[in-house]
Image (tube, rainbow, N blue to C red):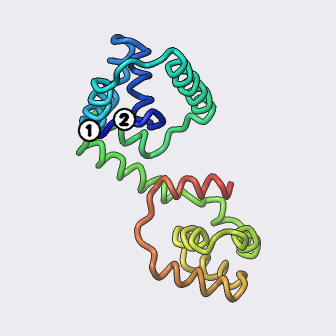
Amino acid sequence: MAELNESSGLYKAAVLLLCLGVERSSKILQYLGESELERVLMAVSEIGTVSQETRAEIMQEALALSMASANLMMGGVEYSRQLLARAVGPRRGAEILERISASQQLSSFEILRSADPAQVANLLAEEHPQTIALVLSYLEAKLAADIMTHLPPELQVEVTLRLAKMDRVSPNVVDVIERGLK
């Protein structure tokens, strides 16, 4: 392994584990994948003496990040995937998550289905064409067409091109867009 850079996340993680001690560090390491575990433990084994000042800076940074993330704690598809993988195994977890995602997507954008197409177009007009295309792809064709007619002509072209090229979209992205529209 190349010499550790003191500003790298890997170095900071290794120092943090040293500061926390064996008991606490072992609990944290349980959540890492095998390759992450190997990288971090290799870094821990390569660290020499760490000054008190460096340890204090890294601990302060970890505390600040922890406090910031506590305010932003979210679930989401990735968290659900990890939770299911540990609970019922990766294969069965993926099957369950696929069913959940499909049912969520069917219920997504419900508010737009009952709104006036002109109002929806007005709401979407300031969004990126890819976002508009994604939203329209989850609506019935007639409603999507009605909304499109209320968009400016140049935006209609951009949205149509993106609809034509659209692949399957991550459920996380759909969730973020849906929350933004509400």
Nearer to me, 161 or 141:
161
Nearer to me, 91 or 23:
23
Horizontal and vertical percent for residue 147? 67, 78
Horizontal and vertical percent for residue 93? 30, 42
Q: Residue at x 44, y 54 (%)?
A: 103
Horizontal and vertical percent for residue 9? 44, 36
Q: Kindly check if marks 2 and 1 are in contact, taking CB atoms under 8 A apart as contact.
A: yes
Dot 2: element: loop
Q: Is residue 122 above or below residue 182?
A: below
Q: Is residue 129 left or right of residue 81?
A: right
| Number of the label disc, if any, that sits on residue 4 | 2
Quarter of the image where one finds residue 109: bottom right
Q: CA distance from mark 2 to mark 1?
A: 8 Å
The C terminus, quarter of image: bottom right
Horizontal and vertical percent for residue 108? 55, 57
Nearer to me, 26 or 93:
26
How many numbered marks have been drawn onto this rendered protein structure?
A: 2
Dot 1: element: loop
Q: Is residue 1 left or right of residue 147?
A: left
Residue wearing tag 1: 1
Check disc 2 and give the amino acid type.
Leu
| Number of the label disc, if any, that sits on residue 23 | none
Q: Residue at x 42, y 53 (%)?
A: 101
Quarter of the image where one finds residue 11: top left
User: Are there few (<14), some (14-19), or many (20+) residues within 10 Å of tag 1?
Assistant: few
User: Are there few (<14), some (14-19), or many (20+) residues within 10 Å of tag 2?
Assistant: some
Check disc 1 and give the amino acid type.
Met
Q: Is residue 31 above or below residue 129?
A: above
Q: Is residue 31 above or below residue 97?
A: above
